[in-house]
Image (tube, rainbow, N blue to C red):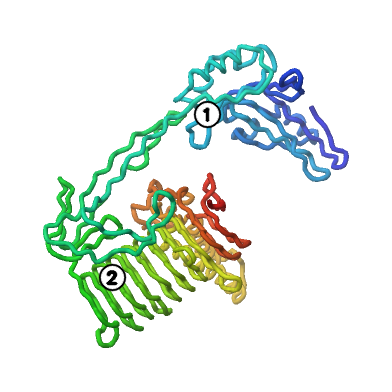
């Protein structure tokens, strides 16, 4: 069939449809109404074509605009529109601007809808347009197999569906037809301590609350005392989704125990014992050592000089500007740290405030502090904040937990795990940046690459302004190649901890040839869908939020929300908290 448009004088050739459509009465007699129903088509079956187009093209005709919708695709030569699955074709007319030809949107509604988790599938039965319809010709189990359902078919539901098909039904039916078998979770290996080590501040409890009790450190132990026993992992049992694919169970992870000074680990029994009297230090629930205790009953100043110890250290005073405290074991500072450097191979607790632009606090384990002003903090474990962060940069490989009523003004707060905050920002202050499920080092790399890109683009502009010439000159082509390389790195840089460095859109080739072998595309990261930012108070408009590779700028002030990724992991959504 052909038609022409008088306004544009353009003649269009309409497509030939390779399936049958018919308007029939649908629904109960008292509420029946006519709608267009299509016959069932198979996977890769042609849906539409322009078989006589060459003949009409010579006479000035064009093809009517056609767009491929869900579960359809054009053939390589674009002459045929094909179905991606067994299902019911649908044609929608999309009106365009004045004088433009409407577009035909052709899609297919699958015979079987498989849910996102692939643990449930429903059979969609559309009313037949004739007594001799396709779904009655073939055994239903074969059609389900063709639709990709290979496991968990509900036999009762199958019989129900077959009974409906055998009748001349005139309504739509949506029948849950198959169910996957969920995996049975395992239990991760863990350390069962033989002595009371006290609460781990900032720990997320089973009821969703956070334990903010004061952390107990400097725990004395005796020679040959049993410290802990490694409880081995219990493997889970795999499940199966409706497509027949095995689903790996969660849990059942091995725990790599790191034993440092004055500790003995019996791999057979799993027992960990002290080899001398001392202070127990536990780092990130997997590293254990016993150290001596060193107490300093004054400030760290010109009288004491810098402190560098392999042991646990308690400073009863403050750390004065310019001085360093470096320890191999746990470190507790009873008072303030002012423009000082604090470094520990274990955990750090600071009872006073932290001030000064030159202040750097770092620990391989957890950091528990009161407030920080214009300082920098890096933790290999978790961070617990009890009062305030003012224009400071905080990063942790684990979680960051802020006690109720705390405030974050400006600065950057970046957690490799989840983030719990109270109040963020102020009406007139510089906005803060919050991130969860983000590798802090990669975030720094992203910012460096962004600065590099701006510089490279500006260099091209300056060169052209200064020397003129063609944009296709050898020099400009070289500069543009550098710009393209930087853009590609930014595009593929993956901020999610544990993933390959440049794995966001596939592997880089020559541009990052020297990347480490561990950064292969198959490297798995953290479960980013489980990462969240809990806002217990208020976050002011202008706050920038990032979860993994997604970011969000708060355009208005919000309160009491949980920020997490949407189901497709492509955007950040805000849900009300209880």
Identify which residue is drawn at 53% across, 70% down: 455
Question: For numbered disc 1, what is the local secondary structure?
Answer: strand
Query: In terms of image quadrants, where is residue 463?
Result: bottom right
Q: How far apart, in angstroms, are the residues tagged by discs 1 and 2?
A: 56 Å
Question: For numbered disc 2, what is the local secondary structure?
Answer: strand
Q: Compared to 282, does 231 lie above or below?
A: above
**How many marks can you see?**
2
Query: In terms of image quadrants, where is residue 245?
Result: top left
The N terminus, quarter of image? top right
Q: Earlier in the sequence, mark 1 or mark 2?
A: 1
Residue hosting label 2 = 331
Query: In terms of image quadrants, where is residue 20?
Result: top right
Task: Please give left or right for residue 489 compared with residue 138 in the image.
Answer: left
Task: Answer whether residue 279 is visible to the viewer in this image.
Answer: yes
Q: Between residue 507 and residue 231, name the one nearer to us.
A: 231
Identify which residue is drawn at 33% across, 80% down: 318
Residue 554: x %, y % from top left: 59, 61
Task: Please give left or right for residue 181 compared with residue 563 in the image.
Answer: left
Residue 372: x %, y % from top left: 43, 73
Residue 360: x %, y % from top left: 37, 74
10 Å crowding of disc 1: few (<14), some (14-19), many (20+): many
Identify which residue is drawn at 30% across, 65% down: 347
Task: Answer whether residue 478 is visible to the viewer in this image.
Answer: no
Identify which residue is drawn at 24% across, 44% down: 232
Residue hosting label 1 = 121
Q: Between residue 272 and residue 51, name the one nearer to us.
A: 272
Q: Compared to 123, does 444 lie above or below?
A: below
């Amino acid at each position: 069939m052909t038609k022409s448009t008088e306004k544009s004088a353009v003649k269009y050739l309409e497509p030939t449809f390779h399936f049958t459509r018919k308007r029939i009465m649908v629904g109960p007699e008292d509420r029946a109404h006519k709608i267009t129903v299509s016959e069932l088509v198979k996977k890769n079956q042609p849906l539409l074509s322009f078989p006589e187009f060459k003949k009409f093209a010579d006479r000035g005709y064009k093809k009517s605009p056609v767009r491929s919708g869900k579960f359809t695709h054009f053939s390589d030569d674009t002459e045929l529109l094909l179905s991606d699955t067994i299902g019911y074709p649908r044609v929608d007319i999309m009106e365009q601007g004045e004088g433009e030809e409407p577009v035909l949107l052709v899609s297919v509604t699958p015979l079987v809808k498989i849910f996102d988790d692939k643990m449930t599938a429903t059979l969609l039965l559309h009313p037949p347009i004739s007594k001799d319809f396709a779904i009655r010709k073939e055994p239903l189990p074969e059609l389900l197999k063709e639709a990709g359902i290979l496991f968990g078919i509900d036999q009762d539901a199958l019989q129900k569906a077959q009974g409906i098909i055998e009748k001349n039904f005139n309504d739509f039916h949506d029948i849950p037809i198959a169910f996957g078998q969920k995996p049975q979770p395992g239990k991760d290996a863990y350390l069962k301590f033989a002595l009371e080590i006290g609460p781990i501040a900032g720990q997320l409890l089973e009821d969703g609350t956070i334990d903010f009790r004061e952390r107990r450190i400097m725990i004395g132990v005796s020679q040959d005392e049993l410290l802990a026993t490694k409880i081995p992992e219990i493997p889970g049992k795999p499940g199966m989704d409706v497509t027949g694919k095995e689903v790996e169970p969660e849990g059942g992870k091995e725990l790599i125990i790191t034993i440092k000074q004055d500790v003995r680990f019996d791999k057979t029994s799993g027992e960990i014992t002290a080899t001398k009297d001392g202070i127990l230090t536990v780092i990130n629930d997997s590293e254990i050592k016993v150290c001596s205790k060193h107490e300093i009953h004054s400030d760290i100043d010109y009288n004491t000089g810098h402190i560098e110890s392999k042991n646990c250290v308690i400073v009863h005073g403050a750390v004065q500007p310019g001085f360093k405290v470096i320890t191999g074991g746990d470190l507790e500072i009873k008072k303030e740290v002012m423009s000082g450097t604090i470094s520990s191979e274990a955990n750090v607790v600071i009872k006073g405030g932290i001030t000064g632009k030159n202040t750097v606090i770092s620990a391989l384990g957890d950091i528990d502090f009161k407030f920080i002003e214009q300082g920098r903090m890096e933790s290999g474990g978790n961070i617990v904040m009890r009062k305030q962060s003012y224009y400071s940069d905080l990063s942790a490989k684990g979680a960051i937990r802020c006690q109720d009523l705390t405030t974050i003004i400006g600065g950057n707060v970046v957690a490799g795990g989840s983030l719990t905050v109270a109040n963020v920002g102020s009406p007139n202050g510089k906005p803060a940046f919050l991130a969860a499920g983000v590798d802090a080092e990669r975030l720094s790399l992203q910012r460096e690459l962004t600065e590099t890109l701006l510089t490279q683009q500006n260099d091209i502009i300056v060169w052209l302004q200064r020397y003129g010439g063609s944009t296709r000159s050898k020099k400009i082509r070289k500069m543009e190649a550098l710009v393209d390389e930087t853009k590609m790195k930014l595009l593929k840089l993956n901020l999610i901890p544990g993933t390959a460095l440049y794995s966001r859109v596939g592997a880089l080739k020559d541009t990052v040839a020297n990347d480490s072998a561990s950064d292969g595309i198959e490297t798995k990261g953290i479960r980013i869908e489980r990462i969240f930012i809990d806002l217990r108070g208020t976050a002011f408009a202008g706050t920038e939020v990032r979860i993994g590779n997604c970011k969000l700028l708060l355009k208005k002030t919000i309160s009491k929300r949980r920020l997490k990724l949407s189901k497709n992991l492509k955007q950040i959504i805000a849900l009300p908290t209880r």
